[in-house]
Image (tube, coloured by chain):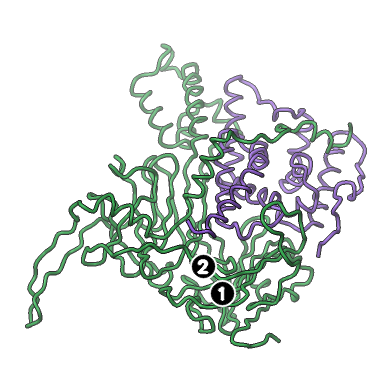
Chain colours: A purple, B green
Amino acid sequence: MGQVGQERQERFELLFESYHAQVAAYARRRAPVEAVEDVVEETFLVAWRRLERVPSEPLPWLYGVARRVLANRARSGRRAVALAERLAQELERGGPADGAPGLSAGLEAALRALSEREREAVLLVAWEGLTPSEGAIAAGCSAAAFRVRLHRARSCLARALGGPEVAVSEERLDPLSGAGES
Amino acid sequence: MSDPLELLRAANPVAEPRAFAAATQRQMIDAIVTHQPTGGGGWVARLLRRVSRRRLYVIVVAAVLAAGCTAGAVAVLHGEQSAPLSGALPGPPGGKYSFSVIPSLGAGTVGWCIGEETQTPPPTLRKLASKLRSDLEQALVHDEAELRQGHLSQARRRQLSGHVNTGIPDALRSLTPARYRSSPLLRKFARLADGLGEGTGVCGEAAMRGRPIIDAMTAGGSGHHVALYLTAPDVAAVRISAAVTVLTAANSQLPDGYRYAVVVEPKGGLGPVAGSGPWPVAALNRNGRVIPARRVLPSEGETTVSWQAQRGRSAVGPPAPSTTPPLAACEIDPRGLAGAKLYYGAVVVHVHGQPQLEGEPYVSCAYTQLYYRGYTVQAAVLLDARHPGKLPALLPDSVTVRSQPDTVNEPQRSVQQPITARRIGDAWLVVETLSQQGSSTLTERLAVLNKLTACVRLHGTLCP
């Protein structure tokens, strides 16, 4: 391997070691545990192929790739797996399955009531800890569109959970808000 | 804690990301890095080391040429016909694969991207289906009168087993007892399982002397595999083992007269050829002789400078030096797209041309990603890679847009998104547009493409 190839591989290894845990966590939150390693490997395979295109802040970009990998494993496949799991539990116990681990029934129902985009927006912020600007990169939309989705999602969740409408300043969510956006 | 965000944070199912074990990390990195296509030389070299002493599976038939021409010996190449670019996967029925080839859009890159799509129930579902089968069997024991004895007949067991191993949706539909057949959840699962699919794409290299196998890719899940070999025009067959030689075929979807061979892994596997493919092959010419492959280093491409609209923390490598596209050989101007938000991209500083390449590949001179009215737009300027400034070839498998004679459209193939391109002087301005709903329509791509402009600065020419 030439020096350029060696440097490229070292750069990739640093990328993998730095971020694979976060990508694995992202996948685990959205896919069965059996699929996590596959999603991580496929996400970083894309990153290896496109290393020159990986931005200097790679995590939101990696989440975006992982999101598409999950979708590629069939947009419907993810739901099918979840459905199959629920179905298996239902058949096993003769009753409906419980919600996701750690989620109350109310919160899970409220999440399910959101559109897919709104749900992804709120989960990118709540579970992945992204700012709206970073979430926009992961979601593949503009920061303004992401903020709208996030606001709608939080309002819907608050209403569904019986609480007051939430009004939180964007600045608190996104310390980089507005900085450098075109 | 009434803020739903706080409630969600508290209910995070994976609160702390955990790194894989060091050995697992190493395995995954090695698997990813060695998956990189290195051109045909590596495979052929490995193959030659392995099989150089084996007899060639070419039957030489001596034939004396008539009409006073020089008499000679002409070898006749024997082999299996290639499987098609899209077809049925071996193994359980219902599995499908599809391959496609489009130009690589990344700035500085030369060559083609192979897309692969596989539709087959993944192992996760198979495991779950196995469990479902067990549950359904029990349900049948209770529900069906003929099974009141408490056991299934051997024939029925075989039928159940066969169904579950071969086709989950069919098994669910045909074997579900009434009380489950009426379940909307089960019906939904069966419907979704029908459409299961996954796909990937890799971007490789263009043909050049010494590289008869341009790229290769495997489709297929945990069962049998199918491998696509994209070859130079003079490759008549690929030999995988002493027993398996597959003839190449032409296809209008492929560029530059490239040929392909799709090899289906036989039921018993490929004997001494291990792994899930792409398997090492030797490229044969039409006389059955091995086309020599020499070690060809992957092209490093042209020197590029990247930019990123929003500067971020630098975690890997140096940060992009600029927040706007720097002055370079090519320029994509998005000002016509009112409200578009630039994200990032790269440009080639000087385009040198790579005359050692064969065929008529493109080099991407500029690449830009931006967001526009809900679309993620990728735009690129493609030049003739061998002789920049020469009119580049038509995009493979593209058709002229009826209302715009300078514009062509390449429909969606496999997992590759459709692309639409307009001639800008001696270049193609190409767009690939993706909406949240998935792939875009031609009208949507034209709406973006027609508002984008580009220019190419070669040989001292200036952009307006």
Residue under mark 1: which chain is it in?
A: B
> Can I make out residue A112 in this image?
yes
Q: Amino acid at mark 1?
A: Leu
Q: Is residue B158 left or right of residue B108?
A: left
Q: Amino acid at mark 2?
A: Pro
Q: Position of residue B320 (x, y in %)?
A: 71, 63
B153 is higher (above) or lower (below) than A110: above
Q: Residues within 10 Å of mark 2 (few under 14, many from 20)?
A: many
- Indicate which disc, 2 or 1, sits on the residue closer to the N terminus: 2
The Cα–Cα distance between marks 2 and 1, rounded to whole angstroms, is 9 Å
Q: Residues within 10 Å of mark 1 (few under 14, many from 20)?
A: many
State if disc 1 and disc 2 touch (CB < 8 Å). yes
Q: Position of residue B269 (x, y in %)?
A: 31, 42
Residue annotated with mark 1: B382
> Can I make out residue B443 in this image?
no
Q: Is residue B420 left or right of residue B118?
A: right
Quadrant in which the N terminus of chain B appears: top right
Q: Nearer the viewer, residue B424 or B145?
A: B424
B198 is higher (above) or lower (below) than B167: below
Q: Quadrant of residue B406?
A: bottom right
Residue annotated with mark 2: B103
Callout 2 and callout 1 share a chain: yes
Q: Position of residue A72 (x, y in %)?
A: 57, 49
Residue under mark 2: which chain is it in?
A: B
